């Protein structure tokens, strides 16, 4: 399960940002997660809930996941379509000359915290 490693990486990044911004605590972290990013949201959340309890800064922080739908572009007919529903083959023209426009993202969008007094 690589989600635990991903969570540790997020915690490290958020901890660094928290120190740079003199935060006393972090209440929430919002992630934008592509639907074909190879990260399973439920596993990520479970790992998060376990791992943050072992930190000082993020001990009670909630993880908010905003999904980004996967969209593919067809180079032949110049149309976009739902990647999950149709895969690599364009449903409009049958071409395999396609590429993913969005849906593979994994981004920290927002960190909400309380500053030190």
Image (cartoon, rainbow, N blue to C red):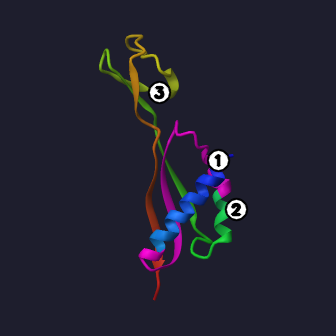
Residues packed near mark 3 inside 10 Å, few (<14), some (14 to 19) or many (20 plus): many
Q: Are marks 2 and 3 in contact (CB under 8 Å)?
A: no
Q: Is residue 67 left or right of residue 60?
A: left
* CA separation in Å, label 2 and label 3: 32 Å
User: Residue at left 58%, top 71%?
Assistant: 58
Q: Is residue 32 magenta?
A: yes
Examine the image and state in which quarter residue 57 appears.
bottom right
**Left or right: 86 as drawn, with respect to 93:** right
Residue 9 rendering spot, x and y as whole percentages = 56, 58
Residue 83, disc: 3
Q: What residue is at 58 percent from the left and 67 percent from the top?
A: 61
| Residue 34 drawn in magenta | yes
> Where is 8 relative to 17, above or below?
above
- Residue under label 2: 50
Label 1 crowd bin: few (<14), some (14–19), many (20+), radius 10 Å = few
Which residues lie in the magenta part?
19-47
Badge 2: few (under 14), some or many (20 or more) residues near its Cα, within 10 Å? few
Name the residue carrying label 1.
Answer: 2
Across and down, in percent, residue 26 comes to 52, 72
The Cα–Cα distance between marks 2 and 1, rounded to whole angstroms, is: 14 Å
Dot placed on the residue nearer the N-terminal end, 2 or 1: 1
Q: Earlier in the sequence, mark 2 or mark 3?
A: 2
State the image coordinates of residue 45 (x, y, percent, origin top left): 63, 54
């Amino acid at each position: 399960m690589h989600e635990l490693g991903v969570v540790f990486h997020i915690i490290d990044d958020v901890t660094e940002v928290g120190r740079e911004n003199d935060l006393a605590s972090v209440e929430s972290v919002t992630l934008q997660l592509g639907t074909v990013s190879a990260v399973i949201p439920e596993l990520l959340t479970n790992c998060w809930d376990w791992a943050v309890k072992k930190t000082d800064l993020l001990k009670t922080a909630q993880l908010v996941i905003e999904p980004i739908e996967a969209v593919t572009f067809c180079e032949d007919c110049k149309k976009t379509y739902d990647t999950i529903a149709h895969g690599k083959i364009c449903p409009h023209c049958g071409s395999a000359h396609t590429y993913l426009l969005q849906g593979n993202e994994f981004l920290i969008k927002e960190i909400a915290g309380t500053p030190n007094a």
